[in-house]
């Protein structure tokens, strides 16, 4: 039941913000830039609100969610992540994460080192709601790689190129 807000997390040897087993918290309005791993990494953290964070130029992913449930991710911005390896990491990645609301995200990629995907939802994720995300020009391969068969797709997702949603969707 804590709030982590309005922090600048820059040039860290690990992730800018890292949670493991953190529940019922608010991570709001932070800037996580140029970190050696991820901008924001959450592992096994549930029922959190993650909102209005700026995640840019991190060596791995902008935001990583692993084995997290019942979180609300909204209005986060990721830009020019995957600085360590061209087309190897993502602006947003979700694995083993279920029953989350993922909305209002915006991502863009750089022109010298590209993020692989704007958002990658791995196949072991279940029942996440994905809606109103602007992922145009956010990943080298696709704006969104949805490998999960149970993702709930709401309106307003924009990617590159725009495609019809189905299992294994790419936009």
Image: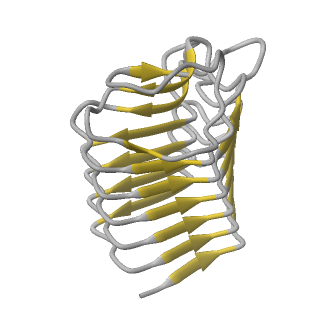
Q: From this view, report whether residue 13 is shown above or below residue 52.
A: above
Residue found 75% across the figure and 21% down from its top: 110
Q: From this view, report whether residue 73 is shown above or below residue 150.
A: below
Between residue 20 and residue 28, name the one nearer to us: 28
Residue 56 visible, this orientation: no
Furthest toward the bottom, the residue is: 1
Between residue 144 and residue 153, name the one nearer to us: 153
Q: Is residue 8 found left or right of 118 in the rendered image?
A: right
Q: From this view, report whether residue 132 is shown above or below residue 26.
A: above
Where residue 5 appears, as percent x and y from the top left, is 65, 75
Q: Is residue 19 found left or right of 95 in the rendered image?
A: right
Where residue 62 appears, as percent x and y from the top left, is 57, 41
Residue 163 visible, this orientation: yes
Where residue 96 appears, as percent x and y from the top left, is 24, 44
Q: Is residue 30 found left or right of 37 in the rendered image?
A: right
Between residue 54 and residue 70, name the one nearer to us: 70
Q: In which quarter of the image is residue 157?
A: top right
Quadrant showing the N terminus: bottom left
Between residue 116 and residue 4, name the one nearer to us: 116
**How many labels, in total?**
0
Where residue 138 appears, as percent x and y from the top left, is 67, 26
Residue found 61% across the figure and 42% down from its top: 35
Quadrant showing the C terminus: top right
Residue found 59% across the figure and 60% down from its top: 74
Residue found 63% across the figure and 31% down from its top: 81
């Amino acid at each position: 039941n804590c709030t982590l807000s309005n922090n600048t997390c820059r040039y860290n040897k690990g992730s800018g913000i890292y949670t493991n087993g953190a529940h019922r918290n608010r991570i709001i309005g932070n800037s996580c830039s140029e970190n050696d791993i991820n901008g924001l990494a959450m592992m096994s953290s549930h029922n959190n609100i993650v909102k209005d964070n700026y995640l840019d130029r991190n060596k791995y992913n902008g935001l990583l969610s692993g084995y997290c449930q019942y979180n609300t991710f909204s209005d986060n911005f990721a830009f020019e992540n995957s600085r360590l390896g061209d087309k190897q990491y993502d602006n947003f990645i979700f694995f083993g994460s279920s029953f989350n609301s993922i909305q209002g995200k915006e991502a863009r990629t750089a022109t010298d080192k590209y993020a692989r995907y704007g958002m990658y939802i791995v196949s072991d994720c279940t029942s996440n709601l994905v809606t109103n995300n602007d992922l145009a020009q956010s990943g080298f391969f696709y704006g969104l790689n949805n490998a999960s068969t149970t993702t709930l797709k709401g309106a307003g997702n924009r990617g590159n190129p725009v495609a019809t949603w189905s299992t294994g969707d790419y936009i």
